[in-house]
Image: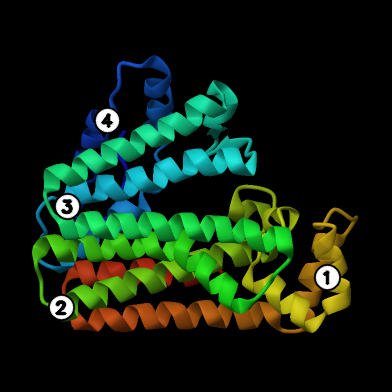
Amino acid sequence: MSVKPFTTSLELPLEAFEERLREVIRSDVEFIRLIEEDLVTAGGKRVRPQLVFLASGALGGAPHAVDMALVVELLHSATLLHDDLVDDAETRRGQVAAFRKYGNAVSVLSGDYLLARLMHLLAEMGRMELVAMVAQTARELSEGEVLQFQVAALADYSLEAYERIITGKTGSVTRLCCEGPAVLAGVPAEQREALAHFGLLYGQAFQMRDDYLDLMGSVEVLGKPVGGDVREGKLTRVTLRLLEEFPQEAGEILRRKGEGVGDLERLRTLAVQAGIDREVVEAIQARVEAAVEHLQALPPSPYRDALEALARKELSRLS
């Protein structure tokens, strides 16, 4: 399956990526093959590979860019297999979740298989610094996911916890997407740091936008029912501010996980009434602007422009 790039003005090697992905995840074990084929055919938006290719292009081209894109996508896909089981999800990318079709053990072990293939790719690339970066990203990702459950279980809500969650879950991976090509290309520290900061801030803004729309968006925008985070007790910037402004009323709704009639609508009303919706949108915008500012350390190019446009696209999704 060919995946269209974010921008039609640039030729990104996404077709080569898809072909290489099929090759890398191929297995003669039927259940693994079926799960991995689901991942390939479902595709998704391939935002992370696009980030890798755009960062590489902004640096004039990095060696092993396709394999770098595979590493981040395999890490992301393995996480999805595990997350769907933990979240008791019904679907993933419009398809029945893997664990529901093949069972818990097969789904988890297939995620492990993807991690093994990822490690093989890293070994072939031969950059120990990159191995350490991927290991650090995997650690932050795992810690962010576990912290999210810990916060929900203990109702221990704080802005510090939220920042760590969005950094671990999303920012760490998008940072790897952007910084990895800089390591492979051997560019000056200034450019590497610029891409690392851009990737981190972009990922945080991406997650903040996703969290915001989960309550303040619509089914049409999300493609799924709103309020999932409230039902799962997950911390978001909106619910944190609601607890600060309306501790009793919002607290009661969140404790019963929005299961009462009109609970979600009431939370949205309170958010608008207190200006929390505008405040969170402004916080997302500030994160995007900070990300874009770091791109100025890179030489002007269509790839740099595309990175900026990708970040600003998060704002357009809020309107």
**Which amino acid is tagged 3?**
Ala
Residue positioned 77% across, 76% down in the render: 243
Q: Earlier in the sequence, mark 1 or mark 3?
A: 3
Cα gap from disc 4 to disc 1, whole angstroms? 47 Å
Are there few (<14), some (14-19), or many (20+) residues within 10 Å of tag 4? some
**Which amino acid is tagged 1?**
Gly
Image-quadrant location for residue 159: bottom right
Direction from residue 28 to residue 120 in the image, left or right: left
- x, y percent for residue 302: 19, 69
Between marks 4 and 2 in the image, the one whose residue lies nearer the viewer: 2
The mark found on residue 264 in the picture is none
- x, y percent for residue 9: 23, 59
- The quarter in which the C terminus is drawn is bottom right
Cα gap from disc 3 to disc 4, whole angstroms? 16 Å
**Which amino acid is tagged 4?**
Arg
The mark found on residue 22 in the picture is 4
- x, y percent for residue 223: 60, 48
Q: Name the residue under label 1.
A: 251
- The quarter in which the N terminus is drawn is top left
Residue positioned 25% across, 72% down in the render: 195
Image-quadrant location for residue 190: bottom left
Q: Name the residue under label 2.
A: 189
C-beta proximity under 8 Å, tags 2 and 3: no
Cα gap from disc 4 to disc 2, whole angstroms? 34 Å
Element carrying mark 2 = helix
Q: Mark 3 points at which residue?
A: 65
- Can residue 130 be spotted in the picture? yes
